Amino acid sequence: MENLQASAPVYKALTIAGSDSGGGAGIQADLKTFSALGAYGASVITALTAQNTLGVQGIYEVSPEFVYQQIESVMCDIGTDAAKTGMLFNAAVIEAVSQALRRFGPQKLVVDPVMYAKSGHALLLPEAVSAMCEKIMPLAYLVTPNIPEAEALAGMKIENEPDIHEAARRIKGLGARNVLIKGGHLAGETSPDFLFEDESFKVLEAPRLPTKNSHGTGCTLSAAITALLARNFSLGDAVTGAKEYLTGALAAAPTIGAGHSPVAHFYRLQETIFNRNI
């Protein structure tokens, strides 16, 4: 076995999100993505879910005090080059996370405003949306809502690209520095995402893949962006690289359950792993 170079840089990424017992989304998807893209991953668990490819069967809340303590433990020792939030679930946890992030940073915070699971189960209580807007959005270097999440944050209906532009401006008005609205819910042969950076829009296109194995796509995309930001990629390059990674992970996604199976987070390693002797 080759010796690892002790001088190789260690890029660190932190995820603050819920646990998915099925392994396809949340903390599990984030840590897989960080590893696949060259970042050391640390984690803070905000809630536990009993979850599989068919949906969410239950949620167990983690106390706000313990969420704060987890962030404190990581940041006082390991630190991070970039971080992301996912499932925050309720206003009390949002308050604890915002207090910790204001105390410890980091500067590069990706906010995935997770509101619903693939099955439609609520992962953010409706009364917590205003807390998300007031407490978390002003800390965000990038926020990555899908269309329904963007509608909730912007307080408007989105039906076309001009609506997406207006929603992005409204979300930026909440304090987020940059906005990426994911267009997977739009109709069409492609799956466009819309990046609003420095008062300009960029459309990132990718083919729409005919697969139901798409569990955890939002978590995976935001985690990929976070990992690349931790590695000092520019925002534009991080978003572009993350979308390319996700497209490949979707194309290679295996069927592992009876519902929406997760994407293949390590698809770039699969050929190497399965074609060599360990």
Image (cartoon, helix red, strand yellow):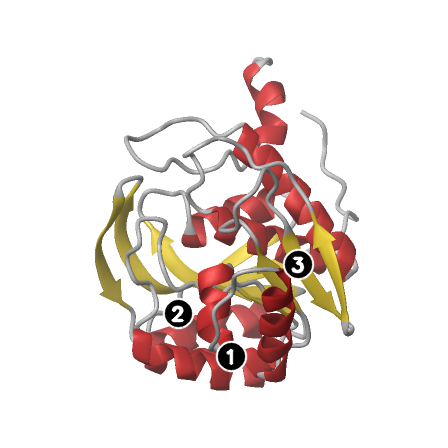
For the question of whether residue 65 can be seen, the reply is: no
- The answer to whether marks 1 and 2 mark residues whose Cβ atoms lie closer than 8 Å is yes
Q: Looking at the picture, does residue 239 appear above or below residue 209?
A: below
Residues packed near mark 3 inside 10 Å, few (<14), some (14 to 19) or many (20 plus) = many
Determine whether the residue tagged by mark 2 lies in a helix, strand or loop: loop
Mark 1 and mark 2 lie on one chain; the one further toward the N terminus is 2
Residues packed near mark 2 inside 10 Å, few (<14), some (14 to 19) or many (20 plus) = many
Question: Which residue is identified by label 3?
Answer: 194
Instruction: Name the foreground residue: 150 vs 55.
Output: 150
Question: Which residue is identified by label 2?
Answer: 88
Q: Residue 78: x and y, percent?
A: 59, 65
Q: Looking at the picture, does residue 184 appear above or below residue 107?
A: above
Question: Which residue is identified by label 1?
Answer: 136
Image quarter (top left, top right, bottom left or bottom right) of the C terminus = top right
Mark 3 and mark 2 lie on one chain; the one further toward the N terminus is 2
In which quadrant of the rendered view does residue 276 lie? top right
Point 42% across, 54% down: residue: 26
Q: Residue 122: x and y, percent?
A: 30, 62
Q: Residue 110: x and y, percent?
A: 59, 66
